[in-house]
Amino acid sequence: MVRLFEKYNTEVIPEMVKRFEYDNVSQVPRLMKLVINMGIGQGSRDAKLIDVAAAELALISGQKPVITKAKHSIAGFKIREGMPVGCKVTLRGKRMFEFLDRLIHVAIPRIRDFRGIPSDSFDGFGNYTFGLEDQTIFPEVNLDKVERTQGMDISIVTTPCTDEEAFEVLRLLGFPFEK
């Protein structure tokens, strides 16, 4: 069993039931999915950048990413409809908890001058989104093969709940929020 999923079942659920006085264990917010998105600005001009980013995202997430394409043409950015502009991965279940475990315990501690992830990035419905500036914090990425650093956005989608409840679930799971 995944270590973080076991922690969620044994520690987080009882603590949430006690703190928010739920009538039923099923009322505790659950993590539904996790979406990792890499937007590649120069990808419309150089298709090789998209392939490299997709390969790195596949290494990081353990799942093949989907290449995202532009929905509209934007003349100012020299983008036409249908051009590749990034890649994304949606993780659920076991893979989601494995990725979160590696993110919390391995990748985030490798960030230089880290003071915590922002605690105000909730959307009002219990979903949390934050960005990472560099893909090299993940140990799966070979530093010798990295041509350029690439950031990513990570969105954690929970069952519909308040931001306070979602914050408490993530805090109990071990997210290092800033003080």
Image (cartoon, helix red, strand yellow):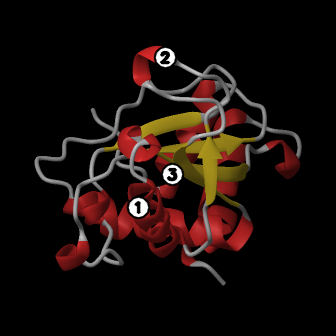
Q: Position of residue 54 (x, y in %)?
A: 49, 63
Residue 4 visible in this rendered orientation of the protein: no
Question: Badge 3, how many Cα within 10 Å: few under 14, some, many 20+?
Answer: some
The label number, if any, that marks residue 75 in the structure image: 2
**Image position of 25 (left or right of 64):** right
Q: Does dot 1 land on a helix, a strand or a loop?
A: helix
Whole-Å distance between the Cαs marked 3 and 2? Answer: 46 Å
Q: Does dot 3 land on a helix, a strand or a loop?
A: helix
Mark closest to the chain's N terminus, 3 or 2: 2
User: To which quarter of the image does residue 149 belong?
Assistant: bottom left
Q: Are marks 1 and 3 in contact (CB under 8 Å)?
A: no
Judging by the rendered image, the residue that carries numbered circle 1 is 48
User: To which quarter of the image does residue 144 belong?
Assistant: bottom left
Q: Is residue 157 above or below residue 179?
A: below
Whole-Å distance between the Cαs marked 1 and 2? Answer: 22 Å
Mark closest to the chain's N terminus, 1 or 2: 1
Question: Badge 2, how many Cα within 10 Å: few under 14, some, many 20+?
Answer: few
Q: Is residue 143 above or below residue 31?
A: below
Which residue is most to the top?
A: 76
Q: Amino acid at mark 1?
A: Lys
Q: Position of residue 49 (x, y in %)?
A: 38, 57
Judging by the rendered image, the residue that carries numbered circle 3 is 172
Q: Amino acid at mark 3?
A: Leu
